[in-house]
Amino acid sequence: MKPLQPSSPHSVYDRDRDRDREREGALSKEMEDKQMKGHVLVLPYPSQGHINPLLQFAKRLASKGVKATLTTTHYTLNSISAAHIGVEPISDGFDEGGFSQAGNVDFYLKSFRDHGSRTLAELIQKFSNSATPVNCVVYDSFLPWALDVAKQHGIYGAAFFTNSATVCSIFAHIHHGLLTLPLTPETTPLLLPGLPPLYFPDLPSFLRFPDSYPAYLAMKLSQYSNLNQADWVFSNTFEELEGKEARGVSEIWPAKLIGPMVPSAYLDERIKGDRGYGSSLWKPLSEECIEWLETKPSNSVVYVSFGSMVSLSEEQIAELAWGLKESNMYFLWVVRDSEQQNLPKWFLDSVQEKGKVVTWCNQLEMLAHRTVGCFVTHCGWNSTLEGLSLGVPMIGVPKWTDQLTDAKFVEEIWEIGVRAKEDEVGVVRKDELLRCLKEVMEGDKSKEIKRNANKWRDSAMKTITEGGSSDKCIDEFVQHLMASYQNLNGL
Ligand code: UDP
């Protein structure tokens, strides 16, 4: 805030003129606000893999003239810093510590629904008397209660799905009783419209083992509970990538494909300075990573990350450590603080020449670096889209939930990488990692994979560039918001 000016010998005329100018300023701000094409609250589930794509969508909307306010929990509020985006808190009932304060998924989700509904309603009311009333809530599909709140206030509600269209299609079939649980090796392959045959190992883990995480399974199914009341359904994928899959299920999941929600600098460069998502729940050590990468030859480094949620067993970490060491390749490995104690004692000293281990980084900057030749990934949907959008060949080491399905598509459908096979106790052994590293980094198959990766990168760029399929869908949404906002504001 500017310090107050000391009183100065202004004439009455000066003061009147200043007052007029102030009034004009306030008026033109009001006009500007009124001319905004709408005001959207964008509400992610408060984890890294959900905040990132929804915040990116907020930035896209803002770049097209819509006022966008990211609405997130008190606990995650400080992790957000994105230009041209407002930020407002709501409560999940655990304002000091978020999910870890709750300690239990079921308890957390119920608390978020109760406190979130109330505080979201208060926020909509707060804006209703301002120059920029809210006319739409874009909510993470994990939080369907937000649609009920939007409808109670007579405004639009748009669901945003953060999984692939394929995964959404499978869950939609289950919700509508078109498929019954549990899925077993005997009841597979699944043959669903628009989808390739899906075998047992390709299916989301919650469906293979419904008792493993009942609260998460219930949440995934609840995404469809009131979806028929949503004014829009958005999916973070794109026509060329999964149009066929989305069309196969469009009657029960009528999604508009608006992805990939990856910062603009890596795709169309239409949003100035948009090089990162603008949210980090951990401190990124990107500068030291880039310095280290700079000293390495092109396409020589293996970047390894399992995202923000996966917790690897000590045995699995040891196998990966052995595999990376024996490959003799350069590697940059993200091992979150909470996982570091599982690294073998011998590892860090013995790989100093070849490897670097960090607790967190800006993943996109790493993937975009000329020295990174391959991405060993858990195949979270954001990581998959990031690897694909940046044309980086992948080795999928999926562990749970939708990652298994994403890994199948990486290997078999888009052919931009390979999937590491687990043994009977669910561990990817060092020899398997070595086989995959050789396949993706060296030899004939690596060339074909790189060609496909470049092809998909081009496609991802085109879809979000002006006139591309995703860009058109976002424009249609903005047009609609604009028309209704003018009515709301009496213009
Ligand atoms: N990420 C990051 N730095 C890291 C590891 C991951 O910025 O060191 C980001 C990554 O770019 C992605 C998100 O965290 O956008 C993880 O989302 P994803 O869907 O891949 O996996 P999740 O964490 O939800 O399992």
Image: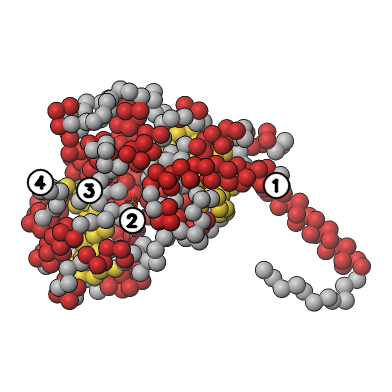
For the residue marked with disc 2, what is the amino acid? Ser
Q: Which mark is residue 398?
A: 3
Please say if the residues under marks 3 and 2 sit with CB atoms less than 8 Å apart: no
Q: Residue at x 47, y 29 (%)?
A: 226
In the image shown, does 41 or 240 lie closer to the viewer? 41
Q: CA distance from mark 2 to mark 4?
A: 25 Å
Q: CA distance from mark 4 to mark 3?
A: 15 Å
Query: Could you tell which of marks 2 and 1 lies nearer the N-terminus?
Result: 1
**In the shown orientation, is residue 433 left or right of residue 204?**
left
Mark 1 vs mark 4, foreground winner is: 4
Mark 4 vs mark 3, foreground winner is: 4
Q: CA distance from mark 3 to mark 2?
A: 13 Å
* Image coordinates for residue 129, horizontal then vertical, percent: 71, 44
Q: Which mark is residue 308?
A: 2
Residue 469 can be seen, yes or no: no
Q: In which image quadrant can residue 282 be found?
A: bottom left
Mark 2 vs mark 1, foreground winner is: 2
For the residue marked with disc 3, what is the amino acid? Pro
Q: CA distance from mark 1 to mark 4?
A: 60 Å
* Image coordinates for residue 281, horizontal then vertical, percent: 41, 60
* Image coordinates for residue 424, horizontal then vertical, percent: 10, 46
Q: What is the residue that sits farthest to the right in this orientation?
A: 12
* Image coordinates for residue 114, horizontal then vertical, percent: 52, 42
Please say if the residues under marks 2 and 1 sit with CB atoms less than 8 Å apart: no
Mark 2 closeness class: few <14, some 14–19, many ≥20 residues within 10 Å = some
Mark 1 closeness class: few <14, some 14–19, many ≥20 residues within 10 Å = few
Q: Does the beta carbon at disc 2 come under 8 Å from ligand 1?
A: yes
Mark 2 vs mark 4, foreground winner is: 4
Q: CA distance from mark 3 to mark 1?
A: 47 Å
Query: Could you tell which of marks 3 and 2 lies nearer the N-terminus?
Result: 2
- Judging by the rendered image, the residue that carries numbered circle 4 is 424
